[in-house]
Image (tube, helix red, strand yellow):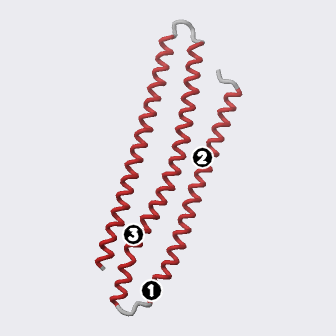
Amino acid sequence: MLTVEQVMASQKASVETLLGLTSKAFEGVEKIVELNLSASKAALAETGDTAKALLSAKDAQELLALQSGLFQPLAEKTAAYSRHLYDIATGSAAEFGKALEGQAAEAQQKFMGLVDNAAKNAPAGSETAVAVMKSAVAAASNALESVQKAVKQATEVAEANFNAVSATAVNAAKPAAKKR
């Protein structure tokens, strides 16, 4: 049987976890806002410099050379921005994942404690029912671990694909910039 102190402690831990996750979510949003502000400032400054350079071109050949020189840096900056944004998102997701895994492990441990306590106080002849209950809890635990491993593997595959696409985009821009 749960005591009032146990219920209050559980509620307090839940509130603390929620506040921690909310704080992490705001940190992620702040990082995205900072990234967007710095990218916007840099883009604005570069646009001004590029416009001045294009307006000062003496002939069409120089203008084409200036334009072709813009493609490679643009592709690299876009890839760097995407990479930074991806890092912020995956960092935030990792924080949430750790918190949820910790909560799940703690809840499972408490539940197993309740099952063990119930088993100690169970009437004679209920050993089979207790064994079935423990087996079900163990099966649920194994299923949860399998899901967590699958999510981790899927995340690793997604990150590898993201890196490959970013590298391909940057490498594709190199020949395009040289041809012009």
Single out the mark in the foreground, 1 or 2.
1
Amino acid found under the numbered disc labelled 3: Ala
Mark sitting earlier along the chain (1/2): 2
Q: Which mark is residue 20?
A: none
Please tell me which residue is depicted at 43% across the width and 43% down the height of the picture.
152
Q: Tell me how far mark 2 sits from mark 3, CA to CA.
A: 35 Å
Mark-to-mark CA distance, 3 and 1: 19 Å
Q: Please identify the quadrant where the C terminus is shown.
A: bottom left
Alpha carbon of mark 1 to alpha carbon of mark 2: how far? 48 Å
Query: Where the N terminus falls, by quadrant?
Result: top right
Using the rendered view, name the quadrant where residue 179 is placed: bottom left
According to the picture, the residue beneath numbered tag 3 turns out to be: 75
CA neighbours of label 2 inside 10 A, class few (<14), some (14 to 19), many (20+): some
Q: Which residue is mark 2?
A: 21
Residue 7: x and y, percent? 67, 29
Q: SS for tag 3?
A: helix
- For label 1, the residue is 53
Judging depth in this view, the residue of 93 and 53 nearest the camera is 53
Earlier sequence position, callout 3 versus callout 1: 1
